[in-house]
Image (tube, coloured by chain):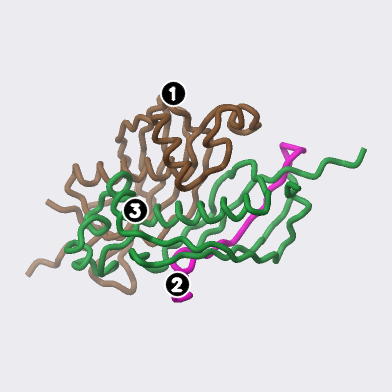
Chain colours: A green, B brown
Amino acid sequence: MPSYLEDFHVGQVERFGAYPVTRDEVLDFAGRFDPQPFHLDDDAAAASAIFGRLSASGWHTAAMTMRMLVDHNQALDRQTLGSPGIDEIRWLRPVYPGDTLRVETEVIEVRPSASRPTMGIVRLRLTTYNQQGEPVMRQVGANFQPRRPAAA
Amino acid sequence: MPSYLEDFHVGQVERFGAYPVTRDEVLDFAGRFDPQPFHLDDDAAAASAIFGRLSASGWHTAAMTMRMLVDHNQALDRQTLGSPGIDEIRWLRPVYPGDTLRVETEVIEVRPSASRPTMGIVRLRLTTYNQQGEPVMRQVGANFQPRRPAAA
């Protein structure tokens, strides 16, 4: 049973995910997409006032979070139609190899689309936590969801 | 010669990058981080009202853009100290295999950090374009930059 716009309500909270952050994946992602020294090299990371030791690219944290979100939605047979964008990303703490990440989402807005009558927009506040319960990233994002077809 | 906060000014525009979007990388990124059908499967993408054909994850577009930004900064021997976050991401058009992406940045704010006297914050409006000159993603982001040491 797919999820429709009408199945979401403001205040709805969901918690999910257990993503193990591996050193190999941190280095692979940074090597491809964010080759700054503090994401690739232990000594450079140790010299960084912000990171202290080798840490994941913030874009990698966003990507790992997306994977948890997609897996969660697919487990619920909930399909989104895409996303118009993100209102805010805050990288609150470094993410280190050995961490395990999880996600909490809260629905903050549900509204029909003005231009596309078959869909609507669900806005989420999304927080990614490490295994110590510390928030590492916060986002406000939006997804397009299909509207429930009217009864015939 | 590294770049300091004092080397940036509001209104500064830079254009750089030529990132070829390959089908293999689109499928690889989506398979790892955003396994929604319209990023993995031609038929599902063709059925999507938003995408029309197989397209890159928006997070992949952000990651490719980051790679162009890091390469550009490194070519200028410009080191950032990390980023506190992003104020906005808008995915304006799908990014398709075969596209070539480029970036334009504009500095919109330069200010010393209140809490860390050795660094400041440079805020950028960043637009990613495809080879037809169409904007595909817009961001407002920020970087920490070191301040120029005072003359002795």
Residue placed at 27% from the left, 63% from the top? A54
Q: Which quadrant, please, contains the C terminus of chain A? A: top right
**Residue sitting nearer the eye, A70 or B18:** A70
| Chain hosting mark 2 | A
Compared across the picture, whether B38 is left or right of B148 comes to right
Up the image or down, B125 lies above or below A138; here it is above
Residue placed at 24% from the left, 59% from the top? A38
| SS type, badge 2 | loop
Task: Say what amino acid the circle numbered 1 marks.
Answer: Gln
Picture quarter containing residue A98?
Answer: bottom left
Marker disc for residue A131: 2
Q: Earlier in the sequence, mark 3 or mark 2?
A: 3
Instruction: Please tell me if label 1 and label 3 are on a single chain.
Output: no
**Residue sitting nearer the eye, A31 or A21:** A21
Marker disc for residue A97: none
Q: Position of residue A21 (x, y in %)?
A: 38, 61
Specify few, some or many for label 2: CA neighbours under 10 Å numbering under 14, 14-19, or 20 or more.
Answer: some
Q: Cα distance, mark 1 to mark 2? A: 45 Å
Label 1 or label 3, whichever lies nearer to me, is 3
Identify residue for label 1. Answer: B132
Asked whether residue A133 is drawn in magenta, I would say: yes
| SS type, badge 3 | helix
Residue placed at 49% from the left, 48% from the top? B89
Q: Is residue A42 visible?
A: yes
Task: Say what amino acid the circle numbered 2 marks.
Answer: Gln
- Tell me the magenta residue range: A113-137
